[in-house]
Amino acid sequence: MTEIPTPHNFDEIPPAIAEPKRRRSLQLVWIIPIIAAIIGASLAIKSYLERGPEITITFLSGESLEAGKTKIKYKDVQIGLVKNIAIAKDRSHVIVTAELTHEAAGLLVDDTRFWVVRARISAGSISGLGTLMGGSYIGVDAGSSQQPREDFKGLERAPVVTMDIPGSHYVLHANDIGSLDISSPIFYRRMQVGEVVAYELDNDGAGVTLKIFIKSPFDRYVKANTLFWHASGIDVSLDSTGIRVNTESIASILLGGISFLSPEDRVDAAPAAPNSKFILFPTKDEALKRPDTVVETYTLVFKESVRGLAIGAPVDLRGVSVGEVSKINIELDHNRKEFAMPVEIQFYPERLKARYRASSRNGKPVSTRELLNALVEHGFRAQLRSGNLLTGQLYVSLDMFANAPPAKIEWSRNPPEFPTMQNSMEQFQTKLMQIVQKLEKLPLEEIAGDARKSIQSLEVTLKSADKLIRNMDAVIVPEARLMIEDARSSLEAVRKTLGSAKQVLSSDAPLQQDMRETLRELNRAARSLRTLGEYLEQHPESLLRGKKEEER
Amino acid sequence: MIGKKVAAAEYGLCSCHVCGLVVSGVHEGETGHCPRCAAHLHMRKPNSVARCWALLLAAYIVYIPANLMPIMETGTLLDYRNDTILSGVIHLWRTGSQGIAAIVFIASIIVPLFKLLALTLLLISVQRRSVWLPEERTRLYRLVELVGRWSMLDIYVVTILAALVHLGSMATVKAGPGAIAFGAVVVLTMFAAIYFDPRLIWDPLRKERKS
């Protein structure tokens, strides 16, 4: 631009075509920032309104929790995010601050529960596998309370049952936990209907209290008289009836479990109220045994060994179980300086009485005391018997012993002492023992010495006997031979004699004929003699006058 | 030196924005048609300052959500992330990609901010008819125009990733609401730069000389 252009030059420049003036007071372009402002403001308002409540949850440890990353999920839907994790002032736990969404505000009530969802692999179930990949999150179980709350205490492990599952909770009391664990199954007729929710040791340490949950509609099968028992694993029992193996299901072999059943004859009982308390029996048998509500305790004092008698061994009355052994003690009798074995039994008199009543004529209930007194008078005794010779299991048998020494139940003792009889086997054993003891007392050695002496003298005797026999051989035998020869010749002579005798005696022998003739003659002679006799009797004068002429 | 230069406006001349024909007889505040292509003729871009301000204000407003809202949602089997621009930069830096972090930081944070501030400076100076460093301010304007489109880098990355990474549950990338806001910031600042008439920087010098 060295040259300043002259106006002349401008003439060549074409003029613009004029256009009427347009005045626009408002610039359309301002709509853009207004729209932007509106959008921005709406976003801000929305985010402000949607900003949910902030809560704090305490956990024992902050394991796998991360500020800004760990989510809070309800039914697997994210409803919040962990904002901050701090350690409590007393360093006993961590405090997690989380911001929830606006919609989640309704969840924040008194009994809402929070827990950290981690991968959990137990024998029965695998859960939370997603957390292996995507990291843990905080699970929520909405409570039903109306009381709002903002600070929560997190559970250390996931609750087994969330509140939205219909069903009922019950409380069981057991002697021990067995192989049960949280989430162990509960079976009803071998069908899984619930789970163990929690367990804890009683304050006094004397038992375990379990909380169980039974899903609806199965909870209506839990009646006031329902019996629960351990269905854990394989129940191998060895008792006087032999070996028994009992299992509930394959799952329960591995996991343990609880079964329940209502007694069949009382199915119409009212369903139990939620949180009712029940006893958890160790076995099904035990559970079903218990309808005997009346239980009486007696002591049986045995003198013999109770080896093989286990607690729980049956008390048997001619094959029917009427009780069981509950305690076995040992007692030292100072006066007599001997041991006694007091065995406590649980006796179910109902079983006995029911039968007794049926047989009694007036049907009047008899008190156990009277009944037992009467029975004992007639020789009713307890006795230890061997139930299984192979295993040596013992059981207590109640029976009548006709020859039992008189005894009475010691009602003054607590528990009352029931008279016992010595075991028949034991009796046999004692007798055997006595024999053995007597045998032991015999002077066996002396006897043996005597025997030896006798044997020696016997030998000597035998030897002399031998000698004697030899002498006899040498001296007597030749003479004997001679003697025998003589005898033989004598015998021959005898035979000859006999032969001639035979000739004489044979029927056609002349001697015989003669003899017969002679006898006949003799007979005739006798007859004429008789005639003579008779004649003489009638006519004695004929002796003098002779035979008178026949007066004919 | 500069002051001696003559502006075409002083002689009532202006050039057509479309065909470049130099036309006379146009005065400030008046309008007319180009005799050759019939386009509107303006001595200066009409309402340049007001439009520029409007767009710039809109850009400022949108800049807030662009930085606060997540720009990219990446979900993998292991992780689920919601990244704003700044958290993305921090994440990249921490995971060892310092170079990329620097690029993203410059392209997505420095550049838009620089554009906003530069345009604000230019507009204020023009409105106050300042004669302060006109040449440097013009250079600044050129830089704003030049650098403007590079701010879209972030948006490109997000959109390309969102389009490419669709591996079902294994990995997904989604553009967050912040991406829209951020895109709006870039577009609005670019428009603002276009509407800005750099000749306005020089006008006060002419007026000053005239008086």
Image (tube, grey):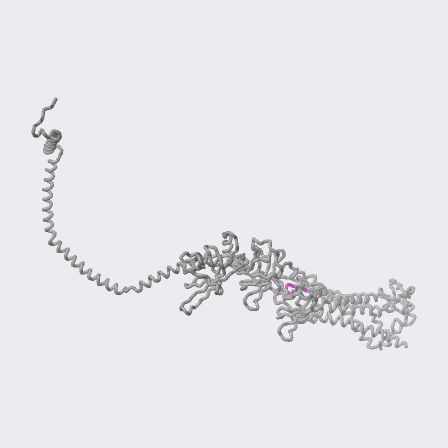
Q: Nearer the viewer, residue A279 or A234?
A: A279
Magenta-drawn stretch contains B155? no
Q: Nearer the viewer, residue B71 or A458?
A: A458
Q: Position of residue B92 (x, y in %)?
A: 67, 70
Q: Nearer the viewer, residue A358 or A205?
A: A358
Q: How many marks?
A: 0
Query: What secondary structure is the magenta-colored segment mainly?
Result: strand
Q: Position of residue A199 (x, y in %)?
A: 58, 65
Name the image quarter holding the C terminus of chain A: top left
Q: Position of residue A547 (x, y in %)?
A: 9, 27
Asked which quadrant contains residue B164, the reply is: bottom right
Residue B140 visible in rendering = yes
Residue at the spot x=16%, y=57% of the render? A466
Name the image quarter holding the N terminus of chain A: bottom right
Segment tinted magenta in the rendering: B74-78
Determine the residue located farthest toward the top in the rendered image: A552
Asked which quadrant contains residue A193, the reply is: bottom right
Residue A253 visible in rendering = no
Q: Is residue A49 left or right of residue A278?
A: right
Q: Is residue A33 left or right of residue A337?
A: right
Q: Is residue A406 left or right of residue A98?
A: left
Residue at the spot x=11%, y=53% of the render? A476
Q: Is residue A394 left or right of residue B81?
A: left
Q: Nearer the viewer, residue A282 or A372?
A: A372
Q: Is residue B204 above or below residue B76?
A: below
Q: Position of residue A383 (x, y in %)?
A: 43, 59
